[in-house]
């Protein structure tokens, strides 16, 4: 990512009119609102699916982070002799816990968003742009990650332990694949596109 930024700076030769941080904040705001994406006639129909996938993924990350904190903070505080904090971070979270609600809503949003985009690629291949391996790989893996994340919870909730473990195993593998192979899938555009738009904003081209 640093090499990518340096290459853009070297190729453009344009002076920076804004700081990197200033440009990044504006770009992130644009991405979260999808204003420009919505103006593009070719991509207009994908806006809702894209937003559902984006916000669903952000919500899932927050949920995972909350569970991580609930698991590790009590453990290490106890190791440090602070006392037993497990009562404050009781897991697994169950409804109506806000973390569980966020996770459920995020999972549904990811399922609908990724499914929407997959179907659109199947039915409108000529209108959606590139349809290569990296484009489909990201959508399929994130759909599987969302689906198995939801089914593992539902199976556990229903007392189907074997099905829950199997579903969770596929979920963890797909999440690992999604993150570890980020540079080789469409997922990489989350960083590269953000940097490109930040650079354009910094030099006054956008």
Image (cartoon, grey):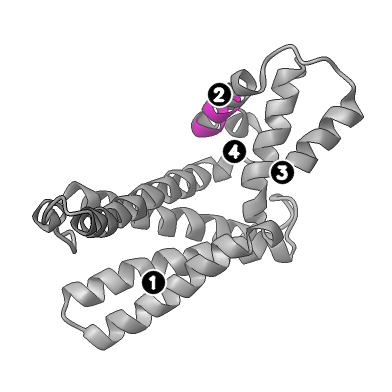
Determine contact: label 4, label 1, CB under 8 Å: no
Looking at the rendered image, the disc whose residue lies closer to the viewer, 1 or 3, is: 3
Furthest-front residue in this view = 81
Upstream in sequence: badge 2 or badge 3:
3
Which SS class for mark 3?
loop
Upstream in sequence: badge 1 or badge 3:
3
Upstream in sequence: badge 4 or badge 2:
2
How dense is the environment of label 2, judged by Cα within 10 Å: few (below 14), some, or many (20 and up)? few
From the viewer's side, name the closer residue of 41 and 65. Answer: 65
Where is residue 146 shown, x and y percent of the image? 42, 63
Question: CA gap, disc 4 to disc 2?
Answer: 24 Å
From the viewer's side, name the closer residue of 75 and 139. Answer: 75
Disc 4: which residue: 44
The disc placed on residue 1 is: 3
Furthest-bottom residue in this view = 162
Upstream in sequence: badge 2 or badge 1:
2
Q: Is residue 18 magenta?
A: no
How dense is the environment of label 3, judged by Cα within 10 Å: few (below 14), some, or many (20 and up)? few
Whether 31 is drawn above or below 178: the answer is above
Whether 63 is drawn above or below 184: the answer is above
Question: CA gap, disc 2 to disc 1?
Answer: 34 Å
Determine contact: label 2, label 3, CB under 8 Å: no
């Amino acid at each position: 990512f640093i090499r990518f930024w340096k290459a853009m700076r070297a190729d453009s030769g344009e002076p920076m009119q804004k700081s990197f941080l200033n440009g990044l904040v504006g770009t992130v705001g644009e991405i979260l609102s999808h204003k420009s994406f919505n103006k593009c006639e070719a991509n207009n129909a994908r806006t809702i699916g894209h937003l559902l996938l984006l916000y669903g993924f952000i919500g899932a990350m927050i949920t995972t982070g909350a569970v991580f904190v609930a698991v590790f903070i009590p453990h290490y505080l106890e190791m440090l002799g602070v006392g037993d904090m497990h009562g404050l971070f009781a897991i697994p979270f169950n409804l109506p816990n806000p973390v569980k609600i966020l996770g459920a809503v995020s999972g549904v949003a990811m399922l609908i968003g990724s499914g929407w985009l997959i179907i659109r690629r199947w039915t409108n291949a000529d209108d959606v742009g590139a349809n290569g391996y990296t484009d489909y790989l990201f959508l399929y893996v994130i759909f599987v990650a969302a689906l198995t994340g939801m089914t593992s919870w539902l199976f556990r909730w229903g007392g189907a332990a074997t099905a829950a473990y199997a579903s969770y195993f596929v979920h963890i593998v797909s999440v690992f694949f999604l993150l570890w192979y980020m540079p080789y899938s469409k997922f990489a555009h989350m960083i590269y596109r953000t940097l490109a738009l930040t650079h354009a904003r910094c030099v006054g081209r956008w």
